[in-house]
Structures are given as C-alpha cells and as structure tokens.
Image (cartoon, helix red, strand yellow):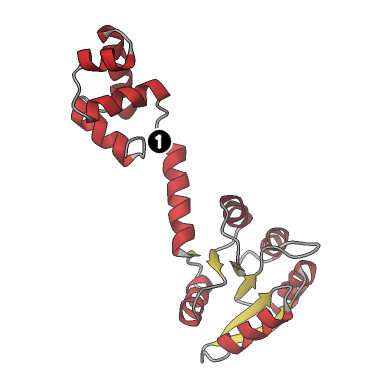
Amino acid sequence: MIGVLTVDDHPVVREGLRGMLEAEPDLEVVGDTGSGAEAVELADHLRPDVVLMDLRMPGTDGVAATVAIKARAPEINIVVLTTYDSDADILRAIEAGAEGYLLKDTSREILADAIRSASRGETVLAPTVASRLVQRSRAASRPALTEREVGVLDCVARGLTNADIGVALHISEATVKTHLIRVFNKLDVSDRTAAVTTAMSLGYLS
C-alpha cells in the first residue's frame, strides 16, 4: 500500500481526495490536515510515501511545508496539488523539492497514477506545467539577439537581399552584413537559411 497524506485548507477538498484515493486498491490516506505547520508534524510522525500538498494556505504555505518536510525526511515524496499554475508558483514548488505539480482539475485516474509514480521518486507534472517549464528552460538557454538583429533576420526570412534589408531598415549594406555575422556567431550557424530556421526554433521568428 502507498500511504498518502493530504494537505489542503478546505475540508471538502480533503474529504473528496480521501474518497477518490481510497477507491484505489493500492492507495491509503494515512492522514489529512488543513495546516502547513501540522503537515510537517504529521509527515514526521506518519512517514507517508507521498504528500499531496496544497500550495496556498494561511500561515505556513505549501512551499514552506515542503522545504521543512524534505529537510526532515527527504525520502518522502511531495506532489503539489493546486489551482494555481503561474510560473512563480511552479518554480517555487519545484525548487523547494516537490516531485510533482498537478492542478486540481486532474482526473482521479491521472492523480492516482501520479501518486504511484511519485512514490517511486519519479517527477510528475501536469502537461501545461511541463510545457511552461520547457519554455522557460529554452528561453533561459537561448542566445540573446538584439531587436535589430531579429529585424534583420525577419527580412532575411522574407527573402530580402542585404541591399534590400539596408533600404528597409535604413542602414547601410555593410551594417547589415555586420549584424548577420553577429547572428551567425550567436546562433552557431554558417548561412542565412540555418540562421532563419534556428531563430524560428528558438521563438525569435514566427
């Protein structure tokens, strides 16, 4: 059996979760609480396999409770279950050590499977959350092109020659060439076509 501790400041949510999870033959709700501070104490006492953690609660919030539980018992796996999917909330929870981040509109089947995965130490993320983390990762790692360099690339994508780009952007042809050389270096490419396709993959061009 996989022991689950549910943490949510709304009693009706905790009751609903208990009903959903105990319908699964291999899941057992070993405790529940509406307090982040009490969640830390219960986790220490009950040693559940997985904690379903609400994010925003009065007093000790889900992130603080996650940090405290992980400090005391790093083997306990924590899955945030919340209605909020802002980038800041997601990052705070993951950085605190949570193994998963799910939204409260998750179906019973997906929730149960996520708890099983989390009990094995696997990462479980709602599809929208995973997508946002990937986008943030790409944005953080992509080379920084200036607005002018993107403008030059946009002209290249539309088939303009260097002379045409100079006229369109009111700069000299030599300046266009300089911008392109810098773009090639930043994107680690050697020709115009590769520069355009790489810029598209990185989200600079649509």
Above or below 189: residue 55: below
Where does the C terminus fall, quadrant-wise? top left
Q: Return the x and y of residue 60 as percentages of the image width and height.
A: 78, 62
Left or right, 93 with respect to 130, comes to right
Where does the N terminus fall, quadrant-wise? bottom right
Task: Work out whether residue 146 can be spotted.
Answer: no
Task: Work out whether residue 42 can be spotted.
Answer: yes
Question: How many numbered dots are placed on residues in this image?
Answer: 1
Q: Return the x and y of residue 92 as percentages of the image width and height.
A: 62, 53
Which residue does the numbered mark 1 point to in the structure image? 142
Above or below 37: residue 108: below
Above or below 200: residue 101: below
Quarter-wise, where is residue 158 in the image? top left
Quarter-wise, where is residue 190 in the image? top left
Left or right, 179 with respect to 15, comes to left
Q: Nearer the viewer, residue 93 or 180?
A: 180
Above or below 107: residue 166: above
Which residue is located at x 28 percent, y 19 percent?
A: 180
- Hey, what amino acid is under mark 1? Arg
